[in-house]
Image (tube, rainbow, N blue to C red):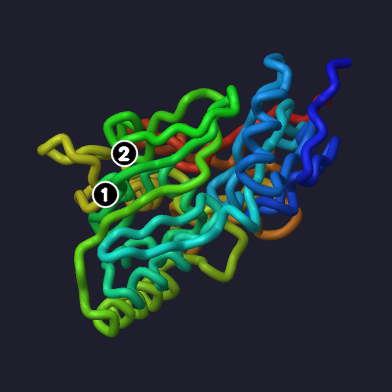
Amino acid sequence: MTSLPEPRGKLTQNRALNDLTWLRVGGPADYLFQPADIDDLKGFLRDLPADFDVFPMGVGSNLIVRDGGLRAVVIRLGRGFNGIEIAGNTVTAGAAALDAHVARKAADAGVDLTFLRTIPGSVGGAVRMNAGCYGSYTADVLRRATIVTRQGEVVDLTPQDLSFRYRQSDLPDGAVLISATFEGPAGDPQALHDRMAAQLQKRDETQPTKDRSAGSTFRNPAGFSSTGRADDVHDLKAWKVIDDAGMRGATKGGAQMSEKHSNFLINAGGATAADLEGLGEEVRKKVYETSGITLEWEIMRVGDPLKE
């Protein structure tokens, strides 16, 4: 068997991933690597044999790992990759920094990145998924993303390199995003904090924030506005077509479509990844039968099903 490099960080074989995802499901990864710093990550990726797949993982807020686990080296950034630096209207954040923390720090400095406040996840995931809400997107404010390539080289990418789309962007295969630089409009710090407080209150009133979920399950059907710009403020919403299909509150094993917000798939207790993904597919089928609309998953699903 091909041996792996010996890094300074923590490398764990056959590491269960269920405790690292918000939905608390999933089998083991072949390896989990938590690099000590950028040089450790560079050396590890450079020396990792080419036949090993690499899967960068954030805080697991938008992820289903299937019950059979993941045949890859999962790379999860932690301390050393979560710093936040602010200069004028420019905010540079490590990929492991939480979106909410970035929004708060930026607001303290009078920089408006308030849309990040209610996004559950880290900066790396926000860039990868072009996260957004309230009509604002990561693509609107990103100026540069820094990655370590599969060959162990540090490379800066522009927004054009990333080809941002609705809930999508392009990163080179096996690359690990380590930081992002944003530029936000100026704002009064107190006004920015007040806006975020109002957004949080609205979120808690309308979304099942106390349940185990992975955020929105499906993308809104009209992923682009008439101008061609990625937009989620249009009229047609995923929750509406799910309601119209009679799937609010639907269950499968321990999985449920939330009664509070029908586009939230939740682990109501003891769900497997197969329960969650299976219920999602049942919802997609029913929505197509009732409306002719094919819902697209917003939650990333990776790994292998459990073998019978």
Q: Position of residue 266 (x, y in %)?
A: 59, 55
Q: Is residue 178 above or below residue 30?
A: below
Q: Quadrant of residue 268?
A: bottom right
Please tell me which residue lies in front, 99 or 20.
Answer: 99
- Could you tell me how far apart the alpha carbons at marks 1 and 2 are, in whole angstroms? 8 Å
Q: Quadrant of residue 49?
A: top right
Please give left or right for residue 102 compared with residue 281 in the image: left
How crowded pointer 1 is (Cα within 10 Å; few <14, some 14-19, many 20+) is rated as many
Q: How many marks?
A: 2
Q: Residue at x 40, y 72 (%)?
A: 104
The residue type indicated by label 2 comes to Tyr
Looking at the rendered image, the disc whose residue lies closer to the viewer, 1 or 2, is 2
Q: Residue at x 70, y 48 (%)?
A: 36
Please give left or right for residue 56 compared with residue 73 in the image: left
Q: Position of residue 163 (x, y in %)?
A: 31, 30
Q: Which residue is mark 1?
A: 232
Task: Note whether residue 218 is visible.
Answer: yes
Q: Which residue is mark 2?
A: 166
Q: Residue at x 40, y 41 (%)?
A: 145
Q: Position of residue 53 (x, y in %)?
A: 67, 23
Q: Residue at x 11, y 38 (%)?
A: 227
Secondary structure under the numbered disc 2 in the rendered image:
loop
Label pair 1/2, CB-CB below 8 angstroms: yes
Please tell me which residue lies in front, 233 or 294.
Answer: 233
